[in-house]
Image (tube, grey):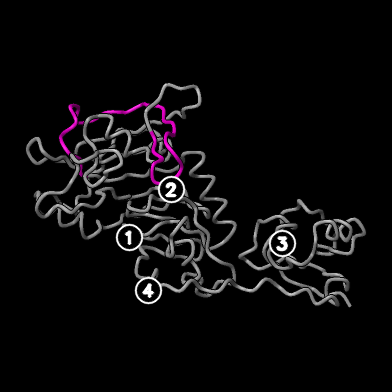
Amino acid sequence: MPEMRTVAEDDDGIRLDRWFRRHYPGLTHARLEKLLRKGEIRLDGKRAKAADRILAGQAMRLPPQIVHAKVEERPKPAPVRTSRRLEDAILYMDKHLIVLNKPSGLATQGGSGLKEHVDGMLDQLSFEKTSRPKLVHRLDRDTSGVLLVARTAQAAAGLSRALVSRDASKVYWALVKGVPKQKHGIVKAALAKEGVRGKDERMTVSQDEEAKFALTEYAVMGQAGQEYAWVAARPVTGRTHQIRVHLASLGTPIMGDFKYGGADVKGKGAIADKLHLHARSIDIARPDGGRLQVIAPLPPHMAKSWDLLGFDADDKRDPFPAKKKRT
């Protein structure tokens, strides 16, 4: 006998073939197409195609070939063993998304030699949902701050569209060595990769045809003499290491950024030898309408530096009040 399934909210908006890959990984695409052509899989009683978008609440008819074959649903991945509690980093959560204050030193995704990373720990954030949360964007391993995680496929698609269409404004705080000559400016410099992939790989300002256009707006929020400056940066594009390279190109590299600042950015006294770059805030279109605005407190090493230099870690000023378009 056929079996009826109701499309869950977590699957709202995804393609039909993706639904089967998610819930019945043992069903090949060729077999799925054959069942669809014969009309044996139906949505709300109607024929369906692999590319059709399904909606929460729709009734899906599964044919006996699938039911009797006892194709098992994909089990949830085993949680990654870790000493960290990702729940402790939650700044905001609703039924669509989670905003984390990612700790400095924790990678966003896995890589060579990495045992702990946010992507491998997302099972901790499933809570009542049956689907696994999804990363929407990423931050460098040593950059702390606002990180978006979608709780549904629909939310992931909506947030990704907002980022691609630049319907979002991300502001970073950095402590740099020296003070930019202009208190407010725009760095427009294309970036290209150089060096061997891995530790030696880095980005550099380049005029090569293959270099990617990159633009960062910045504003000096405060300074300690001519030795240090507190800089807010708003990346208009989203290139790898963009803010780090652009600020270094001004002659003011970020403290603790030895890849782009060399020995000049080594901490002194109470200023730690750790990257002083923090994703402070985000203003982005919500997948369900309206806007999401979140601010992330500074990590401990940056809060200590702010206190030492007399900067206000709770400063709520908008460093870019003249911006006409969110990017």
Q: Amino acid at mark 1?
A: Pro
Q: Which residues are magenta?
A: 175-203
Q: Residue at x 45, y 74 (%)?
A: 81
Local SS, label 4: loop
Dot 1 or dot 2: first in sequence order is 1
Q: Can you identify the residue that label 4 sits on? A: 83
Residue lying at the far left in this picture: please name it.
Answer: 225
Disc 4 marks a residue whose amino acid type is Ser
Residue 8 location, x and y as percent? 66, 68
User: Along the polypeptide, which appears first: circle 3 or circle 2?
Assistant: 3
Image position of 62 (left or right of 191): right
Secondary structure of the residue carrying numbered label 1: loop
Please give the residue where the numbered disc 3 appears in the rendered image.
21
- Residue 44 location, quadrant: bottom right
Asked which secondary structure carries label 2, the reply is strand
Tell me the quadrant of the picture where the N terminus can be found. bottom right
Membership of 316 in magenta stretch: no
Q: CA distance from mark 3 to mark 2?
A: 30 Å
Q: Amino acid at mark 2?
A: Ile
> Residue tagged by mark 1?
103
CA distance separating discs 3 and 4:
32 Å
- Using a 10 Å C-alpha cutoff, classify the residue at mark 4 as few (fewer than 14 neighbours), some (14 to 19) or many (20 or more): few
